[in-house]
Image: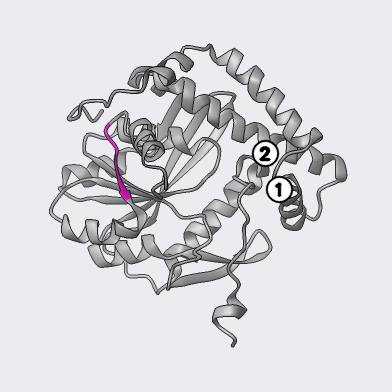
């Protein structure tokens, strides 16, 4: 556990809400998921259309169930973020088990930093908390700052409960290069459309032409870091298994795009295990290759 920090204070209203039992929160999540999936909710048509496009073999009944479970996952994450604010490290460890930490600890013991890439799958918020609590070295995580200053402070407080340092995604490369002498874990999620990125990797993902960020690959290449993927799976409601697997060794020099391609294949396989656990509410596939590369 990273014990070299003082946990920031949560606002009173959040501490009060976090005292609500999990079973009550999940009952509320079930109600909201039902309303979203069957009564009507913003982005429902988008969720259904994207699922149908990526899984054309789904029956109508299976598709309806996937839409419902997608919203259930979203509301479960919201409930767990709020009620999880009262969990200490031990309680979180009972809900999130981590496999594959030993190679990372060997890097840390040798004075080497590592780069971790994850996805918006299952409970990605608890993934960050579990990782920051599970390391003996600091963890720096990329994030997208919120426009509202108070909301941004709250986000940083909740995500930093166990010592994670949040750095704006656009500043991560410079931060890593400037602090190359520090031993730490560097984490980011890379499954969002690279709308503003200058360099993209295109591949077929869930049957669609898809653009991926290459930020993780660029950082690893420049700073000579090993790259690991963090795969979060729900094993029961409120219970998760986080598996850490090697994507690229520190001394490996793969061709450009190879590490990003490996990441895409890992995340695609994860999503196919249980499609509804991915964040389908976002409008995916906004970036098209033909727009940027007419050839």
Q: Which residue is mark 2?
A: 70
Q: Quadrant of the C terminus?
A: bottom right
Question: Is the residue under label 2 in contact with that under label 1 (CB below 8 Å)?
Answer: yes
Q: What x and y, as percent, mark residue 264?
A: 53, 59
Between residue 118 and residue 157, name the one nearer to us. 157
- In this rendering, the answer to whether 37 lies above or below 210 is above
In primary-sequence order, the first of circles 1 and 2 is 1
Q: Which residues are magenta?
A: 163-167
Q: Which quarter of the rendered picture does the N terminus lie within?
A: top left
Crowding near the residue tagged with mark 2, few <14, some 14–19, many ≥20 C-alpha atoms within 10 Å: many
Where disc 2 sits, the SS reads helix
Determine if the magenta segment contains residue 166: yes
- Which residue does the image show at 61% across and 47% down from the upper left? 271
Please state the horizontal and vertical placement of residue 103, each as a whole percent of the image. Answer: 30, 44
Q: Position of residue 161 (x, y in %)?
A: 32, 29
Q: In terms of secondary structure, what is the magenta stretch mainly?
A: strand
Mark 1, residue position: 47
Task: Give the percent coordinates (x, y) of residue 73.
Answer: 62, 34
């Amino acid at each position: 556990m990273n014990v070299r920090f003082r946990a920031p204070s949560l606002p009173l209203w959040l501490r009060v809400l976090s005292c609500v039992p999990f079973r009550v929160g999940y009952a509320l999540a079930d109600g909201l998921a039902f309303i979203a999936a069957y009564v009507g909710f913003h982005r429902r048509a988008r969720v259904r259309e994207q699922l149908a496009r990526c899984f054309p073999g789904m029956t109508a009944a299976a598709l309806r169930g996937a839409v419902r479970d997608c919203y259930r996952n979203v509301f479960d994450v919201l409930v767990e973020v709020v009620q999880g604010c009262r969990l200490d490290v031990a309680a979180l460890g009972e809900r999130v088990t981590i496999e594959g930490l030993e190679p990372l600890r060997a890097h840390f013991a040798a004075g080497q930093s590592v780069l971790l890439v994850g996805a918006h799958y299952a409970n990605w918020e608890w993934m960050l908390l579990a990782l920051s609590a599970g390391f003996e070295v600091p963890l720096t995580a990329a994030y997208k700052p919120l426009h509202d200053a108070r909301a941004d402070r709250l986000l940083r407080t909740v995500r930093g409960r166990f010592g994670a340092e949040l750095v704006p995604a656009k500043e991560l490369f410079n931060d890593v290069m400037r602090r190359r002498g520090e031993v730490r874990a560097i984490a980011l999620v890379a499954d969002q459309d690279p709308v503003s990125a200058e360099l993209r990797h295109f591949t077929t993902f869930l049957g669609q032409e898809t653009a991926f960020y290459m930020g993780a690959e660029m950082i690893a290449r420049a700073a000579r870091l090993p790259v690991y993927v963090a795969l979060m799976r729900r094993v029961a409601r409120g219970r998760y298994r986080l598996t850490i697997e090697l994507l690229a060794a520190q001394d490996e020099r793969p061709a450009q795009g190879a590490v990003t391609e490996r990441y895409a294949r890992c995340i695609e396989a994860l999503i196919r295990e249980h499609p509804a656990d991915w964040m389908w509410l976002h409008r995916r596939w906004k970036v098209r290759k033909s727009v940027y590369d007419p050839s």
